[in-house]
Image (spheres, rainbow, N blue to C red):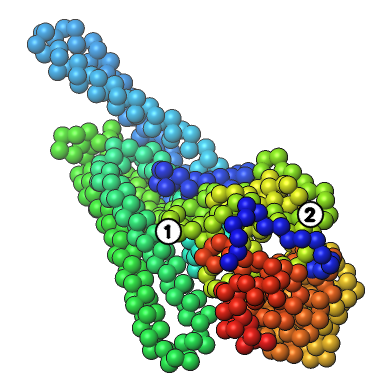
């Protein structure tokens, strides 16, 4: 057994190698507001569209009053001024007479008479306003409208068409700008999320799951984009249109407008409650979609096992159950969305119905009050009433469109919460504020009393103390799950030790920038980490500024150049497929080795690099490693005797502790576990 020593030193030898409901969505909107000029232009277009929308509906009044009055337009304008002047004169006389009579009346009669005088004075003010308006309109009508009802109608219809063309032009520009703002914001948000994800520690990917991240990058981003388009477009444009119409309707008769909108507060309350339910339902659906992505990814990545064991039916059933759950959650959203749409439509119908009944009563009976409540000072004209109806309809149409985007907005709120869960997460592995830069090009690797666990109470490494001088080749062996790969992950600083420290030349890895550390290390892993790109791009990965000549030289040293040029159709420009699927295991490993050779690291990590390749490829790779490991520190996890022959020393790990170390021959004689592993595994692979 390995003696209890405070430290292992490998001797010198030959040189070898959530908040408020909208908090997160407001943060997304902030990205949009950074483009102030585009946003301002979008607002301007929305205002122009809204004003022209209200103006077009307001044209109903002159069309009905002027062209269908039975008089020529000029005669109608003269009559309006005359009638208004007569009304003013009549009320002035009535008010003057009342003011003279009031002091002469008995005290008991003065109160009611004074109240009537006040009403007449209000009516006089309204009549004077009507006269002012009639006098203001008169010269315009006489000057610009032909004195023919038909041609006046034709001119007004032409103005309506021209205004519609202008409105639609601004609307088209508005739609383009809205989509531009939404897409640019989502592009930036997606980039922020990618930056955050790449800065997270390795362990975070196991916690969140790649399927959850994929769902956020795709479906959630799509929901945020749709919500942004809805908010910047519809939620700005449609209320502007509603406000323009409400102002126009209030100008005709504001009391009648208030009477018509009496049910609006109830509709607003229902909308708020439905919004809360929709956001919760959308969040649950998005989480279920992440699970669905995970099921698809797991099944497709393990398709070989699925088919080998005849589990297609089982996987179909598992997928069907998950798909069904997503369907149920989607239908709940549909129910809430339908409720929002129908409640908005019902509210609009009630508002229009109240306006029709009230307005018709006032016009048909030439009344100014309803149930004793004064609605207006003078009876409405048919044209004014029709224009009032048109403007109310102009309010209901934007309200209906807002109800249509209601679900998009709630999805965007839920999606932005899920996205910012990732963006706001703090990585466990961070660079120091004042990093130390290692200047020695031949650093030794030191593990000092290192302990580590993934879960508290379940230690993986216990009190590891180890010193590896520069240039040594060290093999790490032990049973599965003993902590070998974890040891290498700590050196790469994928994790930090729970206790103790790891140093390069007395500099703690936690005091170095991660980039500075990892640029000194080359990794050749059991799982070939190739990307769906060309061969030359995969070899150059990690050394982006290498020339083509340097890439070819590295491939030649790795015994990869020949098969690349002779067996691959496009040579170095051949796309290797997802995870290098178009290549054999040996070809993938040789490309990985060429990548490491091109990087020329000070420290080389080989994690079962030859465990899944054929004998011929293994022999070629070992020839390369025999030369390449010289002049650099090499740590390798292996069960291959051929690989052990490269090592200066062998470390045996069991249950997270260093059990023994020495040369292969020394360990065979004195370490029972090593001898047993050799007999069971190493010898079989020799």
Which residue is painted at 52% across and 87% down in the image?
Answer: 304
At mark 1, the secondary structure is helix
Q: State which tag comes first along the sequence, 2 or 1.
A: 1
Q: Position of residue 177 (x, y in %)?
A: 60, 55
Closer to the camera in the image, 36 or 547: 547
Task: Specify the quadrant of the image occupied by residue 113.
Answer: top left
Quadrant occupied by the N terminus: bottom right
In the image, 137: left or right of 538? left
Horizontally, residue 561 falls left or right of residue 484, namely right
**Label 2, label 1: how many angstroms apart (C-alpha)?**
53 Å
- Residue 541 placement, left or right of 390: right
- Dot 2: what SS? loop
Residue 105 shows which numbered tag? none
Which dot, 2 or 1, sits closer to the camera?
Answer: 2
In the picture shown, does residue 32 fall above or below 312?
A: above
Q: Quadrant of residue 325?
A: bottom left
In the image, 629 versus 240, the foreground residue is 629
User: Where the C terminus falls, by quadrant?
Assistant: bottom right
Where residue 411 is drawn, which disc sits there? Answer: 1
Residue positioned 73% across, 47% down in the render? 506
**Could you say where residue 580 lies in the image, as x and y percent from the top left?**
67, 80
User: Image point 79% across, 68% down: which residue?
Assistant: 17
Q: Are marks 2 and 1 in contact (CB under 8 Å)?
A: no
Q: Nearer the viewer, residue 346 or 367?
A: 346
For label 1, the crowd category at 10 Å Cα-Cα, with few meaning under 14, some 14 to 19 and many 20 or more, is many
Residue occupying the point 54% across, 62% down = 656
Q: Position of residue 475 (x, y in %)?
A: 69, 70
Point out the residue furthest to the right here.
Answer: 549
Q: Which residue is mark 2?
A: 443
> How far from the left and from the top, in percent, is residue 211?
50, 68
């Amino acid at each position: 057994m390995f003696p209890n020593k405070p430290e292992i030193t490998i001797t010198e030898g030959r040189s070898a190698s959530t908040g408020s409901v909208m908090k997160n969505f407001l943060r997304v909107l902030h990205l949009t507001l950074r483009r102030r000029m585009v946003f301002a232009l979008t607002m301007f277009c929305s205002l122009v569209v809204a004003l022209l929308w209200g103006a077009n509906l307001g044209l109903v009044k002159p069309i009905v009053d002027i062209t269908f009055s039975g008089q020529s337009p000029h005669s109608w304008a003269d009559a309006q001024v005359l009638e208004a002047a007569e009304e003013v004169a009549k009320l002035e006389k009535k008010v003057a007479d009342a003011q003279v009579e009031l002091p002469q009346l008995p005290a008991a009669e003065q109160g009611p008479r004074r109240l009537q005088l006040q009403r007449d004075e209000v009516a006089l003010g309204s009549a004077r306003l009507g006269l002012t308006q009639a006098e203001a309109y008169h010269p315009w009508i006489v000057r610009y409208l032909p004195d023919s009802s038909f041609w006046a109608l034709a001119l007004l219809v032409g103005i309506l068409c021209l205004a519609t063309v202008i409105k639609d032009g601004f609307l088209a520009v508005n739609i383009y700008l809205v989509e531009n703002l939404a897409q640019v914001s989502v592009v930036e948000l997606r980039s922020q999320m990618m930056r955050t994800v790449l800065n997270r520690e390795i362990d975070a990917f196991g916690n969140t799951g790649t399927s959850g991240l994929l769902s956020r990058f795709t479906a959630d981003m799509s929901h945020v984009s749709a919500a942004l388009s809805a908010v910047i477009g519809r939620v700005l444009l449609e209320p502007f249109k509603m406000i323009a119409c409400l102002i126009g309707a209030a100008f005709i008769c504001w009391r009648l407008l208030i009477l018509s909108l009496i049910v609006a507060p109830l509709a607003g309350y229902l909308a708020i409650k439905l919004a809360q339910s929709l956001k919760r339902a959308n969040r649950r659906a998005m989480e279920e979609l992440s699970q669905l992505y995970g099921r698809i990814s797991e099944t497709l990545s393990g398709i070989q096992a699925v088919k080998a064991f005849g589990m297609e039916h089982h996987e179909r059933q598992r997928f069907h159950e998950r798909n069904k759950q997503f369907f149920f959650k989607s239908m709940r959203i549909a129910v809430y969305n339908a409720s929002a749409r129908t409640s908005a439509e019902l509210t609009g119908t009630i508002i229009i119905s109240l306006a029709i009944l009230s307005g018709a009563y006032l016009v048909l009976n030439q009344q100014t009050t309803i149930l004793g409540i004064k609605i207006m000072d003078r009876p409405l004209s048919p044209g004014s009433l029709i224009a009032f109806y048109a403007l109310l309809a102009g309010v209901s149409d934007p309200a209906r469109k807002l109800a249509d985007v209601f679900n998009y907005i709630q999805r965007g709120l839920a999606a932005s919460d899920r996205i910012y869960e990732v963006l706001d997460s703090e990585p466990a592995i961070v660079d120091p504020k004042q990093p130390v830069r290692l200047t020695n090009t031949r650093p030794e690797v030191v593990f000092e009393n290192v302990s580590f666990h993934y879960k508290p109470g379940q230690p993986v490494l216990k009190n590891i103390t180890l010193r590896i001088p520069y240039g040594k080749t060290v093999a790490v062996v032990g049973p599965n799950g003993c902590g070998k790969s974890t040891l290498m992950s700590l050196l790469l600083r994928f994790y930090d030790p729970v206790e103790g420290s790891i140093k390069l030349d007395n500099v703690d890895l936690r005091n170095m920038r991660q980039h500075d550390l990892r640029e000194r290390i080359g990794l050749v892993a059991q799982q070939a980490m190739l990307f769906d790109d060309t061969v030359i791009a995969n070899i150059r990965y990690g050394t982006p500024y290498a020339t083509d000549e340097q890439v070819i030289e590295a491939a030649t040293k790795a015994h990869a150049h020949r098969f690349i040029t002779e067996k691959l159709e496009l040579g170095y420009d051949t796309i290797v497929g997802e995870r290098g699927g178009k290549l054999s295991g040996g070809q993938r490993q040789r490309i990985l080795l060429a990548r490491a050779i091109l990087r020329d690291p000070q420290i080389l990590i080989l994690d079962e690099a030859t465990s899944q390749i054929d004998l011929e490829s293994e022999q070629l790779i070992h020839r390369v490693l025999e030369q390449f490991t010289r002049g650099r520190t090499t740590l390798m996890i292996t069960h291959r005797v051929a690989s052990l022959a490269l090592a200066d020393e062998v470390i045996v790990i069991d249950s997270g502790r260093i059990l023994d170390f020495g040369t292969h021959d020394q360990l065979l004689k004195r370490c029972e576990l090593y001898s047993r592993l050799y007999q069971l595994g190493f010898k079989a692979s020799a």
